[in-house]
Image (cartoon, coloured by chain):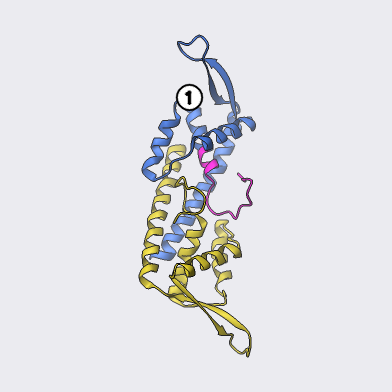
Chain colours: A yellow, B blue
Amino acid sequence: MKGKRDSTGFLIKQRAFLKLYLLTSIEKEPWYGLQLLDELKASFKPYGFVPQHSEVYRALHDLTEDGILSRKKVKENGSKYKEVAVYSIADKEEAKAYKKLVKADLDRCEQLLRKALKDNFS
Amino acid sequence: MKGKRDSTGFLIKQRAFLKLYLLTSIEKEPWYGLQLLDELKASFKPYGFVPQHSEVYRALHDLTEDGILSRKKVKENGSKYKEVAVYSIADKEEAKAYKKLVKADLDRCEQLLRKALKDNFS
């Protein structure tokens, strides 16, 4: 959960937040060629959050490096040569454990925000 | 509300969060020599958030630069020579307007966290 910068433990990092969504999405169905990416981005838009593609790629990369996701190349439907990357869950237990960590951090962050609303606006 | 880094609009920045607390605290009573700093830090500790002194100083500096706070030097109680900085609200309307902006962002962040809890854990 630690980034490269020293953390003061403020709010959850964007990377961890995206990894959580990627795991939940890929648990439901494997990702073929990032076709779900725009859907994911659209769902955050009403909240003013527009993640960069590069940040999503890095999150996928991290999860693959850590052995939680696996990535393989398959021929794209209807194409003889074009290949797309397919991401699927490689280690269900690790995926579950990681999600549990992120949940604890989301709960903590929600409490910190509520505290700030209470301390400053009531 | 924008930092120097490009923002993807993820969660509120630590600087804005600290500025909010500083304004609320200084609205109640002027800050003499940062004596309230440790109290502020202690209140975040149960939430795993330990802001650096340097970050609090930068927040005070920003608010002073923006004309929302004023800073003056006064003789410390009981001391003939030692001076401490006193921070007080210089522009009540601006302070109020800034807090309103931060409140909107806190509300947005709380909704984004709730969405993540719902989307991934229900």
- Specify whether B31 is left or right of A104: right
Q: Is residue B49 above or below residue A78?
A: above
Residue at 42% over, 55% down: A106
Residue at 39% over, 45% down: B47
Q: Which residue is mark 1?
A: B29
Amino acid carrying label 1: it is: Glu
Would residue B62 be counted in the magenta stretch?
Answer: no
Q: Counting other residues with Cα less than 10 Å from the Cα at mark 1, is it few (<14), some (14-19), or many (20 or more)?
A: few
- The quadrant the C terminus of chain A occupies is top left
- Using the rendered view, name the quadrant where residue A99 is placed: bottom left
Would residue B5 be counted in the magenta stretch?
Answer: yes
Tell me the element at label 1: loop
Residue A77, percent across and down? Answer: 58, 87
Residue A83, percent across and down? Answer: 60, 83
Q: Is residue A95 above or below residue B15?
A: below
Residue A35, percent across and down? Answer: 57, 75
Residue at 44% over, 47% down: A9
Residue B64, percent across and down? Answer: 61, 30
Q: In the image, which residues are magenta?
A: B1-18
Task: Tell which of A106 and A98 is nearer to you.
Answer: A98
